[in-house]
Image (cartoon, helix red, strand yellow):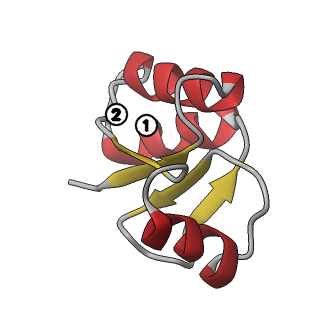
Amino acid sequence: MITVTVYSLGEGCPHCVRTCKCLTVAGIRSTVIDITVDEDARRFVTERLGYAQAPVVVIDQDPAVHWCGFRPDLIQQVAARTGASS
């Protein structure tokens, strides 16, 4: 089983909300971390991964497997890999 973490700007971010909804519809469980309140998470996203926008999606807590923005194509690839239904 894979783990999916979404680093989000909260409910006011339309791309973050759409990403989380798309993950849910695809049958993929995820953990959402609000980087507006979690300073360590914000530093991880900006300094370690190098992103300046959200959401940032990290698969299996592996900094080599991640993306930012609303990417339904990549969500579907993860769903296919895990056997989740879309």
Residue located at (70% from left, 37% from top): 71
| Residue 60 rendering spot, x and y as whole percentages | 35, 65
| Residue 68 rendering spot, x and y as whole percentages | 70, 52
Direction from residue 14 to residue 38 in the image, left or right? left
Image quadrant for the C terminus? top left
Q: Amino acid at mark 2?
A: Ile
Q: Amino acid at mark 1?
A: Ala
Residue 28 is labelled as 2
Tell me the crowding category of disc 1: few under 14, some 14 to 19, or many 20 or more residues within 10 angstroms, Cα based.
Answer: some
- Direction right: furthest residue: 52
Q: Earlier in the sequence, mark 2 or mark 1?
A: 2
**Where 44 sits versus 2, above or below?**
below
- Direction bottom: furthest residue: 48
- Quarter residue 26 falls in: top left
Residue 79 is labelled as 1
Q: CA distance from mark 2 to mark 1?
A: 7 Å
